Image: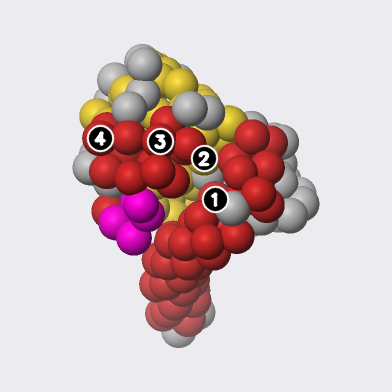
Amino acid sequence: MVTANMLKEFNFFKDFSHEQLERLAGIATEESHPAGKQMYKKGDPARSLFLIQEGKVVMSLESYLGPHRPPMQVTVDTVAKGEVMGWSAVVEPFIYTLGALCIDNTRLIALEAGKLRDLMDEDCDLGFKAMKAIAKIIASRLSHTRIILVGERGLSQLTEY
């Protein structure tokens, strides 16, 4: 059973009141996944927002290099203990934008997407705090993606000469 105190350990919830954490704990469940498990792929319906309690998850996308070449797996980020993934659960169109692969045995807390969105609608303060925290995650992923893109562009320019 997930408690408010368990949620309080995540920096994501630092601005939330105890009452808000209690409400969130009421819709949370715990999950465990073995190393090597693909939790979801890019394009899957976003079923939950996940909080990592233990383990590591690689966030990746496939980069297509042409019709006769296999896609290349690009790691955008690695999410570890204390971090959050699955922001697509609360941002339309509610489809995951990256794949998630457990690289360690992983324990997480899952906040079911529909119930979370309902709570965010009912409690505007909770919703605002959640969206501020989600915006930080999106900004971080965008930054990592830019670094990867610049690196790839730089390498492709170097190999042309």
Task: Report whether residue 139 is seen.
Answer: yes
Amino acid bearing label 3: Glu
Task: Say which element carries label 3.
Answer: helix
Q: Which residue is mark 1?
A: 87
Task: Say which element carries label 4.
Answer: helix
Q: Which residue is mark 4?
A: 5
Task: Give me the C-alpha separation between circle 3 and circle 4.
Answer: 9 Å
The residue segment tinted magenta is 13-17
Quadrant where the N terminus lies? top left
- Depth order, front residue of 138/103: 138
Amino acid bearing label 2: Leu
Task: Say which element carries label 1.
Answer: helix
Q: Position of residue 148 (x, y in %)?
A: 43, 67
- Whether residues under marks 2 and 3 lie with C-beta atoms below 8 angstroms apart, the answer is no
Query: Is the residue marked by circle 4 packed among few (<14), some (14-19), or many (20+) residues within 10 Å?
Result: few
Magenta span includes 112: no
Task: Give me the C-alpha separation between circle 2 and circle 3.
Answer: 16 Å
The label on residue 49 is: 2
Q: Which residue is mark 3?
A: 22
- Depth order, front residue of 99/12: 12
- Whether residues under marks 2 and 1 lie with C-beta atoms below 8 angstroms apart, the answer is yes
Task: Say which element carries label 2.
Answer: strand
Q: Position of residue 115 (x, y in %)?
A: 64, 34
Tell me: residue 146, above or below residue 6.
below
Q: Residue at x 48, y 27 (%)?
A: 26
Decide which of tag 1 and tag 4 comes sooner along the chain. Answer: 4
